[in-house]
Amino acid sequence: MRIRIVIALILTTLIMGGCGVSDDDGSNQSSGNGNQNEVESKPDVAAFNDQFTENFLISTEPVREGYYPFKSEIGTITMDFPENMVVGEKSHQIADGNRGEMFEISSADMNSKVFTNHLFKYFNFTREIKYTKESMAGSTGEELDFKTMDTGISNQYTEIAEYQDGADEFLATLVWNDNHQEIQVFTNMTCRDDLNEDECKKEQEKAKQSALEILKTIKILPEEE
Amino acid sequence: MSLDQITSSNIWMRLVDAEYENMDEQEFSDRFKTIYLEETGELFEGEIKMYHSSDSEKIKGINSSYDGTAFTVSYSEEKNLYLISQGTQGGSDWLYNVEGPFANEKFDQAEAARTFVIEAKDHFDFNPDEGEVISFNHSLGLHNSSMTGLSEEAFDEVYGVNGLTFSPYEIISFDAKFYNAVRKEFDIKRIEEIDKIPLADLKGFTKDYYSDAQVTISNTVSEDDPLYLISEKFGFVPFDNTTMVDTNPEVSGLKELIDNIPDSKVNDLRNLAAAFSRGNQKGGFNQGLNEALGVNITNLKSYNAVGVGAWYINYPDEVDETMEGLQDNLPVVLENIRLIEENSEEIFNSLYEYGYISKEQKDVMIKELTNLEKELTRLNDAVDFNVDMHNEDGWFDKIRRGIGDTGLAAVAAILYYKIPNILDRIKESGTLESLEGIVESHSITEMLNALAEGNRSYVGKDLVFTSDTGGGDPIKVNMSAALRLYTQGVTSLEVKQTLITELETLVRDEIEFAYKDQRWKVMHEIYNVESSPSSYAYELGQYRFPSYKISSVNVLHEILPLEQADLDEEIADMKHSVDTGFNYIENYRKAIEDLFKEDEEVSTLFDLSRRI
């Protein structure tokens, strides 16, 4: 109880006081999966060179060329993670009781021809899937035409919708199972400014294929007790 | 009667306040009609259907502390769907305020609100083209509803009282098209870069971006509401239709005080809240504290149980962890406290001048914050001295050499005794209770009172009329309570009256029936005897007169009428009691009506209240 008062006091007075606090950059390391990869055995790729991303990679052995096994912090999402992408620490959020997790993965090369972002949202809700689709349509402001994607993963369903806004290409992906778990992924692919229209289209198509390579490997795991 | 009345502030605000009681459909419908009557003087004769988020399997799944009620109101050709989202209520909601909107570390309540809106439309089979979808909110409720309203245009109108808005940092991951717009506008590629955008620019862009939204959002805010003022400082986006109201004229507004927080420190505060939030999500409150301040409270229990010497002999890992945590985090905490202490004169003088705390409380706070800073400095020094415990001449080495360690004792004692004692003295001063007045300005009642006109005011969730009749001090009458007493009293007496009538009938019927039944049996037997005397020869003693035969029998028997066989006296007493009750209630009503002679509405309220 006393400590609660300490917190209340500190936060209240800090907020009301008009005083400064430290210049601490506030970076706090997520414990992730507690991966303890040895420095010397780490592959020299962007994903492993980013300390926060490394926490989500469960092995230094690639699952296939250019992809490493990924597991989300609460352990309900796995996928093949591309070596040239990173997880954004500021985007990472966890809902009460591990009932949800959100994070963004993006191209590590800020100057790539097409910059790709995937915003992942995992929920363990019992809502009907039509509500989720409605909600995703609301968030994107688009009439999403979801089409089934064959992933070869049993006991789960994957549907994907494509749309455009100006020169940008977007994907909205929904993965769910019969156990009330669902993952929404919002993907955008933006061309570098110096690309002309044709080049942009061509590079976006390549980026889309790469994105699909990731999206089709998304697997929902049961919640850990 | 029109559905438009429902969006008048005194009606919807009272509805939101009442919704906290988690009523069932009948109770909610009655309460709605009562509030409507009290505020408009008219009886609402439409139909109300209700659906609570706790009845939704979908919302339960989200497990987010989100609480809301959806209801449809139909009258004549009109039908609207309304959603009430509760605001900051219990500890879990305040925690969510820190972790969600401020720290941007949680997102589930807004998602719950988003799902509930979609589901409510489905549940009521409500077609938005045929009626309006309107959202009423308090505090955190507005935050959830406005995000859904702006992102998906799920509502036609959104109303908030002391409503928390939302931060650009938060809505960016909620509204995919807004995120895309931010990327283009500020040439950023991912959420990670959002801190590069000056807060004022991002806030301005967010406000402009949503200014074209179809939904109308109105927020009525107390000038003293701490949550709103802090959120404004944190870059939360204000709505165009924001009305500021001085709900507590006895104190000056907090705005100036909060405005003094340097913009450069807002991110630090957000990071502190985020650190706490991440820890809290991983391992509860203690873990949150551990992440934010570096003190593992659980470990200190061992210290208290065994004493300092045994603590680091028996629990070296705990000591190790405590020291390392303190070494990592204490400097930041100390710096924060030091800065507060340096400014404590200004802070607490302001709070004293604004009327929130007394002079004594101000003095205690300034003195004890100085003590707190002193102890934390000592703690910091002790930790610096002791943290290399495993090195030569560290703690364990000293223990081995039997030297002991006064530094560790100092650390533990400061953590376990000195700081709590300081906090106890602060607590005893009543300062925290006095500051609760600030939180009161977040309540709906204070806002209703500030907006009330004429002789109206509010106590809790009740409407109060004030009378100046007859001079002297004004007389306040709790009209809601009076109407409840009247309607419930009259109803109860009417029920009693009906029961007495039933009893009376029953008593009469039963006794008369029994009397008639018995009389019939006797008469029937007399008839049998008289009509067939030979059958009764033995019973009539013919055997004693062998030379005679009974030829006829004439029974002489008088059956007296039923007298003194009722409960008339008791029933009369009961009726008298009911009449007295009615007299009391009618006299009570008359007394109130006399107090408000010029207000014909009062009499109407009494009449109509019985029809709810």
Image: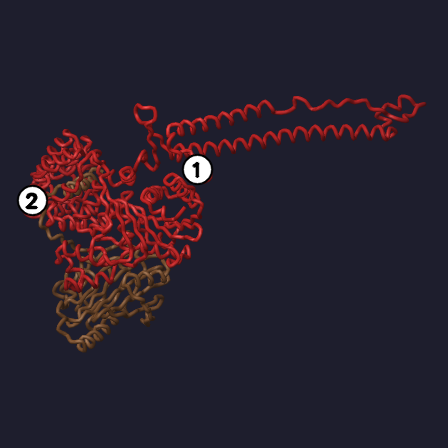
Above or below — where is B471 with respect to A32?
A: above
Above or below — where is B444 with respect to A102?
A: above
Specify the label residue B218 is tagged with. none
Q: Is residue B426 visible?
A: yes
* Amino acid at circle 1: Ser
> Horizontal placement of A222 versus B321: left or right?
right
Residue at label 1?
B609
* Amino acid at circle 2: Asp
Chain of residue at mark 2:
B
Residue reaching furthest to the right: B547
> Horizontal placement of B563 versus A24: left or right?
right
Residue reaching furthest to the front: B598
> For numbered disc 2, what is the local secondary structure?
helix
Specify the label residue B384 is tagged with. 2
Q: Position of residue B544 (x, y in %)?
A: 89, 21
Q: Chain A shown in which color?
A: brown
Q: Position of residue B358 (x, y in %)?
A: 16, 30
> Horizontal placement of A9 versus B390: left or right?
right
